[in-house]
Amino acid sequence: MTIAEKILAAHSGKDAVSPGEFISAKVDVVLSNDITAPIAIREFKRIGVKNVFDPKKVIMLSDHFVPNKDIHSAEQAKILREFAREQGIVYFEVGQMGIEHVLLPEQGLVVPGDVIIGADSHTCTYGAVGAFATGMGSTDIASAMATGEIWMKVPPTIKFVFHGKAQKWVSGKDFILHTIGDIGVDGALYSAMEFTGPSIDKLSMDGRFTMANMAVEAGAKAGLFRVDKKTEAYLQNRAKRPYTVYEADKDAEYAQVIEYDAASIEPQVAFPHLPSNTKPISQVGNVKIDQSIIGSCTNGRIEDLKIAADILQWQRVNENVRCIIIPGTQEVYLEAMRRGYIEIFIRAGAAVSTPTCGPCLGGHMGVLAEGERSISTTNRNFVGRMGSTKSEVYLSNPAIAAASAILGRIASPDEIKN
């Protein structure tokens, strides 16, 4: 079996499962946020169950529209707050919380071998620590909060093998954008993407979180990495509970095996209006921008901020560009302060925000007007994703986003660092 199949078999009480099989599986974490939780809470109450199945396994936080931007978002957050107090579940308030998919791994709330469901499509992020993590609808979340189980079909697994040494400035974001550009936004539809190979072994945990995060942009059900020494080191002082590591069998059956030469992958830019509309930076041309966003659950970790700070140091944000930097959690924010990154950003002319999803979904803190363009380290660039339906979003890694903020057009950091 593959990693995904082994985890699902263990959680469904079976010796083995195979793609296409329908199972009922026990869950380790049930997650929802200020957009999706109010619906889940309403449906949970309709079920007629008084208490969640296990308050330690149900996590809620407000991260999309907080600090609250208007009365409606404040009411949404209030519903979560009151339900969390009533049920005694795991809850993160403004000031302690962060962007959910950065926060949960940081806090050790997701561990290898878990089955994790979240009412957010980017729940697949946690596959970076060797868990089976997937997004579901709010009604599924309500049912899981009541029963501790989910009903689902076992997905086939596609194996992606990366060989070779990565070029300068190439990160996990570029690996996943290149992959999505190759197979398309439905290339891994309802499949588990398993990432492996020598290049992946060298990739940092932050880079792995980025890749797992965007598995859903290829239509995947989940994106998984094997647990290695880097994973164990990351979890050493974080994991809140014991865990089980699952390895793919040597004779595991994959729906497909796709191999890439990492050395041939340039930094990537996804043009509007799909994450699959990718071009290497050498072929981007002259694309002027109005805004640069560095952050989100895709690239809001300390490694991402370090890259941005290295490029923005002793530089100034272009007078025609708004550069907005959003650390993924309060801990990331604090560490960035300790290292001096926040001062670098502010001296460069960037705005630094408290953790929030904000502009990624066109919520606040960077909504685009008609005709405006933004380079962004976020994960989606659909029509109207960041504001006006007549605006444009280009996706990139933090290095390109920082260089672009300085030059006022989508640019390689080599243009600055050389």
Image (cartoon, rainbow, N blue to C red):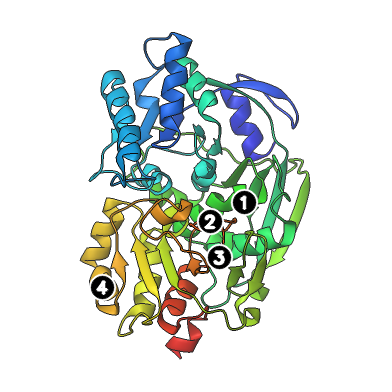
Q: Nearer the viewer, mark 3 or mark 1?
A: 3
Q: Secondary structure at mark 2?
A: loop
Q: Secondary structure at mark 1?
A: helix
Measured Cα–Cα span from mark 2 to mark 4: 25 Å
Q: Which residue is mark 3?
A: 392
Q: Which residue is mark 2?
A: 379
x%, y% of residue 86? 27, 19
* Marks 1,2: beta carbons within 8 A: yes
Q: Secondary structure at mark 4?
A: helix
255 relative to 340 in the view: left or right:
right
> Which of disc 4 and disc 2 is earlier in sequence?
4
Measured Cα–Cα span from mark 1 to mark 2: 8 Å
Amino acid beneath label 4: Ile
Q: Residue at x 52, y 81 (%)?
A: 412
Q: Which mark is residue 346?
A: 4
Q: Which residue is mark 1?
A: 217
Amino acid beneath label 3: Glu
x%, y% of residue 243? 45, 34
353 relative to 17 in the view: left or right:
left
Task: Please say if 90 is above or below 46.
Answer: below
> Which of disc 3 and disc 2 is earlier in sequence?
2
Task: Please say if 13 is above or below 108.
Answer: above
Q: Secondary structure at mark 3?
A: strand
